[in-house]
Amino acid sequence: MKLIRLIAVIVVLLITGANIAMATEEAPYTVLKADDIFELREYPPQILAEIIVDGELEDAGNKAFRPLFRYISGDNKSRDKIAMTVPVSQEHKGEKISMTAPVSQQSIQGKWAVGFMMPASYTMETLPIPDDTNIKLRQVPARRLAVVRYSGFWSEEKYLLHREKLEKWIKDNRYTVTGEAVWARYNPPFTLWFMRRNEILIPVAAGAN
C-alpha cells in the first residue's frame, strides 16, 4: 500500500511539474483546416535562436539544448534573461547552402538545426547577441504548414512513422510541399511520455486550401 501511495505521489508531482513548466509562450498560429490528427496552419513571422549540431535525430536535440538554454539564461552580450517558449524545433540542415535554408539529406551525412522560438515582444534589433557564436538569430517569414500531432517517446521510429502519415495526408489533399519537415517538441524531458505533445510540420504553398 505504501508503495502504491509513493508511486501515486510521484505521478502527481510529474504531472503538476509538467504543467508548470509548460506555462510558457507558444508560437501563435491560425488553424485553416483540421482533420483528425492533421491540421493546416498559418504562422506569422517568428524569430529563432538556432544552432547547428551533428548527430542522430534523437541525440541532436539534447546536444543543442544546453547552449541554447544558456543563451536565454543570460549567456549573451547584455546578460538578459529571455523567457522559455515552445516549441523547440529541429530540422535537417545541409552543408552545401546557407544556414537559413533547409535541404534534404541523408541523416548519416546531415546536420540538425535546433531552435528556440523567441518571445513575440522581441525583434531582431532588440534581441541580445549570443556569446556563443554558434548560435544564430534567424527571422522566419510567415508561412503555411501542414502538421501532424502525436504523443509518446522522442524516438526516430515515431518521427519517421508520423512524417510518412503527414506526407500521405499532404499528397491526398493535393498540397505542394515547399520545404523540409520540422520536428517540434513542446514538453520538458521529465514529462510522462503519454502526456507529451510532439508535432511534425511541413511547409506547403500559401495557395493551399
Image (spheres, grey):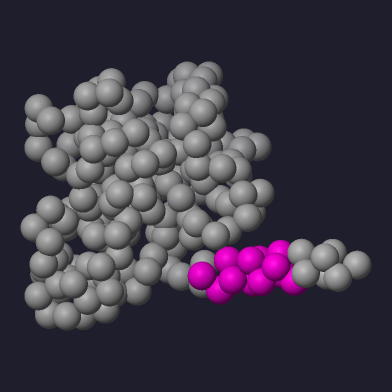
Q: Residue at x 13, y 66 (%)?
A: 130
Picture coordinates of residue 125 (x, y %)?
A: 11, 69
> Is 12 one of the magenta-colored residues?
yes
**Does residue 39 show up?**
no
Q: Residue at x 20, y 44 (%)?
A: 52
> Is 106 one of the magenta-colored residues?
no
- In this view, the residue in front, 169 or 87, is 87
Q: Is residue 91 above or below residue 185?
A: above
**Does residue 179 show up?**
yes
Quarter placement of the N terminus: bottom right
- In this view, the residue in front, 60 or 82, is 60
- In this view, the residue in front, 206 or 111, is 111
Picture coordinates of residue 67 (x, y %)?
A: 24, 60
Image quarter of residue 65: bottom left
Q: Kindly report the secondary structure that dominates the magenta region of the rendered protein.
A: helix
Image quarter of residue 38: top right
Q: Is residue 173 above or below residue 128?
A: above
Q: Is residue 79 left or right of residue 42?
A: left
Picture coordinates of residue 128 (x, y %)?
A: 14, 72
User: What residue occupies the far front of the structure in this picture?
Assistant: 2
Q: Where does the magenta region start and end? A: 8-21
How many labels were placed on the picture?
0
Q: Residue at x 42, y 55 (%)?
A: 87
- In this view, the residue in front, 164 or 7, is 7
